[in-house]
Amino acid sequence: MSARERTSTYELLAELPLTIDSYELEGLTANVSSEFERKTTIIHVRGAGEEGLGEDVTYDSVDHDILQAAGPSLPLTGSYTLASFSAHLATLDLFPEPPVREVSARYRTWAYESAALDLALRQAQTSLHAALSREPLPVRFVVSLRLGEPPTLAPITRRLERYPGLRFKLDPTSSWDERLIAELRHTEAIDSVDFKSFYKGTIVDQPTDPALYRRVVEAFPEAWIEDPALTPETEEVLAAHREHFSWDAPIHSIEDIEALPYPPRMVNIKPSRLGGLRNLLDAYDYCAARGIGAYGGGQFELGIGRGQIQYLASIFHADAPNDVAPSGYNLPATPAGLPSSPLEPSPSRIGFRWDDAT
C-alpha cells in the first residue's frame, strides 16, 4: 500500500505550521442576476510577512453588517498547525449576534479556515496542489441561472450570443410552460436542472410540482436532476431517472451522503456548506473511494472565494458540471472577454489562490 493510500487528504495538510499576528475584515457588495444585493466578507489573516484570504458567503446581509461593525474581535493571534487552528476556531463564537440561519455557521467557519489554509501554504512557500501532490486540470463549468418571472429565454440567449459554447444549470419553476421548455431544449445547452426542494423561506423556493417535474425530465433526459422533492407523486414521475439524481442543499457531511434515499452517482460538494477543511477533504476522499461523482458549487462569491472553489474543482473534479463559472456570467449584463469553459489552470505559485479569477 502506498503512502498516498495510507494517508487521508486532510492529513497531508493538518500539520502545516501557521502563525497569525493579526486579521482584518473587508466587505464586498454587488447586485447579481437573482435580483438581490449580495454581500460577503473577506477575511484577511496576516503573519510572518504573509497574508491569507478567505470569503464568508453567509447569505443574510444583516449578518455581514453586524460582523463588519464588530470588527476583528476574535482571539486568533498565535502559533498553530492547521489542525490546532481548526480546533481553536471551533471553541469560538464566530457571530457577534446569532445568525439568521443555522447553516451560516458553516459558511463562516469555511471563511476563516480557507484564509488560514492560504496563509499556512504561503508561509510554507508552497501551493495547495503541490502540498497534495495533485495536478490542476482544466475546469469544466456551467452557468447557474433563473429565468425571471415571467420566465423567458432571454437570459440564455444573451449569454449564448456572446459565448456560444456555454452550458447551463437552470432552476425550473412552475411558471415554465411547454413553449419555454421547448425553446430551452432547442439550445442543447442544459446540463443540469435544480428543483430547489430543500429551500424554505428564501427567494429561490420552488414548491413541489409533479407536472413541472414531468415536463422537465422528459425534455432533458440526460440532465442531472438536482435536489428533487421525493413524494409519492414525484417518485412516479422520477423513477426512471434516478441515475441522474444529484444532491446539493442536504449535503453538509459524509453522514448526509450516506443518508440519501438512493445511493448517489453524483453530489454537489460546496466547500462552504461542508463547513471546514477536514469535513471537505474527508468528503472528497469518501466519494472517490466509492466511485461517487462530485462537482463544485458556488454561493455567489464576490471575491477570493470564487477562485478558491475553481482551484478545488481543478484538483478534485475538473471534468464535471461544476457550478463555478467566472462571476461575470452571473451579472445581469454579461461582459465581453470572460474565459470560456474549460478554465485553464491558473493556481498561484504559493497559497490557496487561483490567479486572475473572475
Image: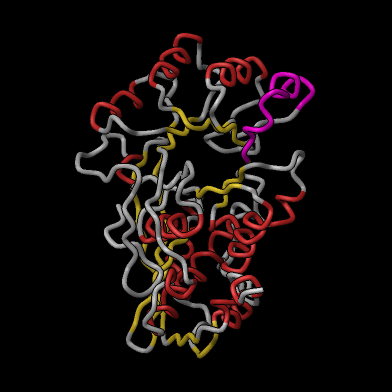
Q: Quadrant of residue 276?
A: bottom right
Front-lying residue, 29 or 48: 48
Considering only vertical position in the picture, is 178 above or below 324? Answer: above
What main secondary structure does the magenta stretch of the protein show? Answer: helix
Give the side of residue 336 with respect to residue 10, left or right.
left
Front-lying residue, 317 or 233: 317
**Image point (64%, 70%), residue name:** 5
**Image point (54%, 27%), residue name:** 222
Please provide percent x and percent y for residue 294.
Answer: 57, 49
Count of residue discs: 0
Q: Which residue range is magenta in the image?
A: 231-246
Please provide percent x and percent y for residue 341.
Answer: 34, 42
232 in the magenta segment: yes
Give the quadrant of the N terminus: bottom right
**Image point (35%, 26%), residue name:** 156
Q: Which residue of the protein is positioned furthest toward the right in this rendering? A: 232
Front-lying residue, 216 or 53: 216
